[in-house]
C-alpha cells in the first residue's frame, strides 16, 4: 500500500474533471486517472481509479470538515488496506490523507450493467455460473478475515480487462475484529436481509442473503426489484417457483443456454441453494464454504450426463452405418431403393 501525494492525485483527475468521471455512487465519485511513477531510471504509467467523497470533489479542498461521505470512504480505506490480495476482491493501491482512495481500474463495467443494461449478448451460461463462483470465493475470503461486506449487489461486482469478477465498494463493510460496537443496519433495498433489523443481528448470514439475491439475478437476469412486474421482489417471485420445481421459468428467459436440458440438474441445485441463502430462517442459510463447494459441484453436473449423450451419439452413428449398408445391398445399377 502506498501513501500518495494529495495534490498529485487531484492533478491526475484533472482537478476532478467531469471528463475523468467514471461513476457516481451514493457517497463517492470515481475518476479514471493515469499515474506516473519513477523507479530508478524506469518510468511507469498505470491507469487507476480514484474515489473521492462527492462533497470533496465539489469543494476541491483537502481540509473540509468530515462529512458522512468522508467517514464512509475512510472506513473503506481502513478495511481495504487491511486485506491481503485476493483475485476476486478489487485491489487497493493506496490513499492520500485518507480522503482519496486509489484502486485498480476496472474497464468492463459492473455485473448489473452486464445483466440489465448492456446491449451485448449475455455471457454463456457456464461463464455466468463461474462469475457466481468468483463472487462467492471473494465473500468467503472476506468472512475468513472477519469482514462483513453488508452491500453485496450486482452494481458492486466489477469486471477487469479479462472479464474476471471483483467485489468492490467496502464503504459499509464491518471488521468484526476491530469494530467493537455494531453500526446501525444498512445496505441496499432489494438486497438487504429482512432479518437484519437490529445492530446485534449482523452476521455472516447477512451477506449470505444479499448473495442469494445476486445469484437469483445471475440465473434469471431479472432485477432485484422490478416495479414493472408482480411480485416486484426477485425473492418473492423466484422462491415459490423453486419450491414448485418450475425452474425453467426462472432460467429460460435469460438467454445464454440456461434453459437447456443439459443444465437442468445443475440449475436445480443452484436454485435450491439460492432459496436457502434467502431463507427467513437465518440459521438454515448456508455459509460461504458450503456455497463455493456447491457451485463447484454444480459446474461438474452437466458432465454427469456426458456418458448418456455419448451412448446416444454412438447409437445414432451405428444406425446411420447400418442404413448405409442396407441401402448398398438393396441398390443395383439404374435403380434406387428407399430404406426409410
Ligand atoms: N475501480 C473502478 N473501476 C472502474 N469503475 C469503478 C471503480 N470503482 C467504482 N467504479 C464505478 O463507479 C461507480 C460508483 O462507485 P461505488 O459503488 O464504489 O460508489 P459508492 O458511493 O460506494 O456507491 P454506493 O451507492 O453503492 O454506496 C460504480 O457503480 C462503478 O460503476
Image (cartoon, rainbow, N blue to C red):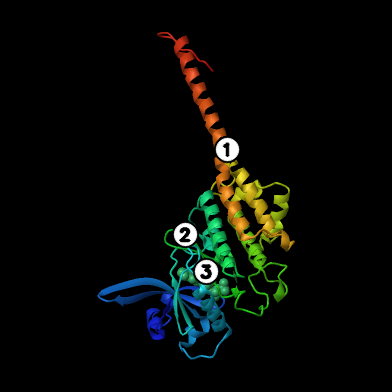
Kindly report the distance in space between the C-alpha atoms of the residues bearing marks 1 and 2: 28 Å
Residue at the far left: name it: 41
Is there CB contact under 8 Å for labels 3 and 2? no
Task: Pick the quarter of the image with the C terminus.
Answer: top right
Crowd around label 2: few <14 · some 14–19 · many ≥20 (10 Å): some
Report whether the residue tagged 3 is closer than 8 Å to ligand 1: yes
Residue 215 placement: quadrant: bottom right
Say whether residue 239 is left or right of residue 151: right
Q: Residue at x 38, y 71 (%)?
A: 47
For label 1, the residue is 305
Q: Position of residue 171 (x, y in %)?
A: 56, 75
Crowd around label 3: few <14 · some 14–19 · many ≥20 (10 Å): many
For label 2, the residue is 164
Kindly report the distance in space between the C-alpha atoms of the residues bearing marks 3 and 2: 13 Å
Q: Secondary structure at mark 1?
A: loop
Q: Residue at x 60, y 58 (%)?
A: 289
Look at the image and tell me whether residue 116 can be seen: no
Q: Residue at x 52, y 30 (%)?
A: 313
Q: Which mark is residue 168?
A: 3
The total of numbered circles placed on residues is 3
Q: Secondary structure at mark 2?
A: loop
Look at the image and tell me whether residue 187 can be seen: yes
Amino acid at each position: 500500500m502506498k501513501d500518495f501525494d494529495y495534490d498529485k492525485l487531484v492533478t491526475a483527475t484533472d482537478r476532478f474533471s467531469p471528463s475523468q468521471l467514471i461513476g457516481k455512487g451514493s457517497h463517492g465519485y470515481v475518476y479514471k486517472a493515469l499515474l506516473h511513477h519513477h523507479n530508478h531510471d524506469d518510468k511507469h504509467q498505470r491507469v487507476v481509479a480514484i474515489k473521492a467523497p462527492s462533497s470533496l470533489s465539489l469543494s476541491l479542498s483537502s481540509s473540509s470538515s468530515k462529512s458522512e461521505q468522508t467517514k464512509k470512504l475512510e472506513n473503506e480505506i481502513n478495511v481495504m488496506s487491511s486485506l491481503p490480495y485476493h483475485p476476486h476482491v478489487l485491489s487497493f493501491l493506496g490513499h492520500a490523507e485518507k480522503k482519496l482512495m486509489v484502486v485498480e481500474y476496472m474497464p468492463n463495467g459492473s455485473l448489473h450493467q452486464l445483466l440489465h443494461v448492456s446491449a451485448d449478448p449475455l455471457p454463456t451460461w457456464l461463464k455466468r455460473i463461474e462469475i457466481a463462483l468468483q463472487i462467492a470465493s471473494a465473500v468467503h475470503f472476506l468472512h475468513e478475515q472477519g469482514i462483513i461486506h453488508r452491500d453485496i449487489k450486482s452494481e458492486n461486482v466489477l469486471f477487469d480487462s479479462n472479464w474476471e469478477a471483483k467485489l468492490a465498494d467496502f464503504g459499509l463493510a464491518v471488521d468484526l475484529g476491530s469494530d467493537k460496537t455494531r453500526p446501525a443496519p444498512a445496505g441496499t433495498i432489494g438486497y438487504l436481509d429482512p432479518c437484519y433489523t437490529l445492530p446485534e443481528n449482523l452476521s455472516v448470514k447477512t451477506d449470505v442473503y444479499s448473495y442469494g439475491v445476486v445469484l437469483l439475478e445471475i440465473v434469471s437476469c431479472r432485477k432485484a426489484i422490478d416495479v414493472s412486474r408482480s411480485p416486484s421482489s426477485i425473492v418473492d417471485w423466484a422462491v415459490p417457483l423453486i419450491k414448485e420445481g418450475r425452474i425453467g421459468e426462472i432460467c429460460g428467459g435469460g438467454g445464454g443456454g440456461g434453459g437447456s436440458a443439459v443444465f437442468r440438474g445443475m440449475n436445480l441445485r443452484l436454485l435450491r441453494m439460492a432459496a436457502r441463502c434467502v431463507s427467513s430462517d437465518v440459521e438454515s442459510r448456508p455459509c460461504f464454504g458450503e456455497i463455493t463447494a456447491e457451485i463447484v459441484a454444480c459446474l461438474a453436473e452437466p458432465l454427469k450426463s456426458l456418458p448418456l449423450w455419448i451412448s446416444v451419439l454412438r447409437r445414432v452413428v451405428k444406425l446411420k452405418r447400418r442404413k448405409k449398408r442396407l441401402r448398398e445391398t438393396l441398390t443395383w445399377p439404374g435403380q434406387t431403393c428407399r430404406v426409410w
